[in-house]
Image (tube, grey):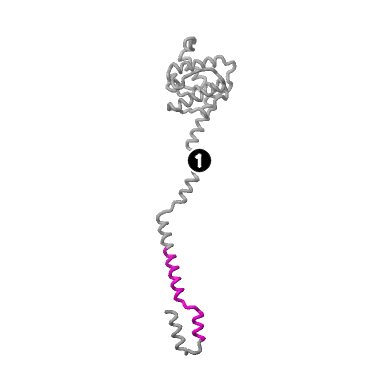
């Protein structure tokens, strides 16, 4: 016999229990179809059994719903708690499946000898929600470094033109210097002409001028 036939708690009683214990404002059992509330109820019953960062608190797709229910199933398995449920049906917010699991948890809660004193359900959820928001807006340091290096490596067209013009001027200057060097006579040749005793002064001047042609 299923829990729904041997237990008389109504849907409204379940919603009231969930809202008061976990500080929520859900009005329909279908809201449990995201899986995150069930994960928190399980963690309340079995402290530290599910880490807050394992739960997708802002789940709004079926893929994320399934992820939460898989996290819940893993917690059941880890603690060797016998309870079968259909993840696909739960993630699709099938009423009967949600009702059955909610009644299962309410039964466990009522049988719990000691309640968790000082338990803050908002803090358990809020801490991870803040962390998720920060993570989404933060850029890895490596990504910032890569971007900086990329910007430093960019060269404007004007810079390219200046570099090319400068290079061209340097090449022309080297060419001119090379040409001038070939037209400049060696000092030894001039000295040889000046020391030649067989030529008169006019002949020496003429020979020296010819060296510069």
Q: Is residue 184 magenta?
A: yes
Q: Is residue 132 above or below residue 37?
A: below
Q: Is residue 111 magenta?
A: no
x then y, percent, for residue 43: 54, 23
Could you say whether the residue bearing mark 1 is in a helix, strand or loop? loop
Count of residue discs:
1
**Image quarter hosting the C terminus:** bottom left
Q: Is residue 113 left or right of residue 1?
A: right
Please tell me which residue lies in front, 83 or 193. Answer: 193
Q: Residue at x 48, y 48 (%)?
A: 149
Residue receiving disc 1: 140
Q: Residues within 10 Å of mark 1 (few under 14, many from 20)?
A: few
**Location of residue 209 in the rendering, given as x and y in whole percent from the top left corner:** 44, 82
Residue 116 percent across, percent down from the top left: 58, 20
Vertically, is 205 above or below 71? below
Q: Position of residue 66 (x, y in %)?
A: 46, 25
Camera-side residue of 43 and 124: 43
Is 121 left, or right, of 93 in this rendering?
A: right
Task: Assign the magenta stretch its main secondary structure.
Answer: helix
Highlighted magenta segment, given as a residue range: 168-195
Name the residue rendered at 47%, 10% in the picture: 5
Residue shown at the point (47%, 89%) measured from the top left? 201
Front residue of 174 and 17: 174
């Amino acid at each position: 016999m299923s829990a729904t036939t041997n237990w008389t708690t109504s849907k409204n009683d379940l919603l009231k229990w969930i809202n008061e214990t976990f500080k929520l404002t859900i009005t329909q059992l279908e809201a449990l179809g995201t899986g995150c509330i069930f994960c928190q109820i399980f963690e309340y019953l079995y402290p530290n059994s599910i880490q807050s960062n394992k739960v997708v608190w802002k789940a709004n797709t079926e893929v994320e719903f399934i992820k939460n229910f898989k996290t819940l199933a893993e917690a059941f398995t880890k603690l060797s708690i016998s309870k079968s449920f259909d993840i696909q049906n739960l993630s699709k917010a099938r009423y009967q499946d949600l009702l059955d699991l909610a009644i299962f948890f309410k039964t466990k809660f009522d049988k719990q000898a000691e309640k968790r004193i000082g338990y803050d359900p908002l803090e358990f959820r809020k801490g991870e929600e803040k962390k998720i928001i920060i993570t989404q807006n933060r850029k890895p340091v490596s990504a910032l470094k890569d971007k900086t290096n990329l910007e430093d490596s960019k060269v404007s067209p004007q810079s390219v033109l200046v570099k090319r013009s400068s290079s061209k001027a340097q090449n022309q200057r080297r060419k001119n210097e090379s040409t001038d060097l070939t037209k400049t006579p060696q000092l030894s040749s001039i000295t040889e002409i000046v020391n030649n005793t067989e030529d008169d002064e006019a002949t020496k001047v003429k020979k020296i001028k010819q060296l510069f042609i």
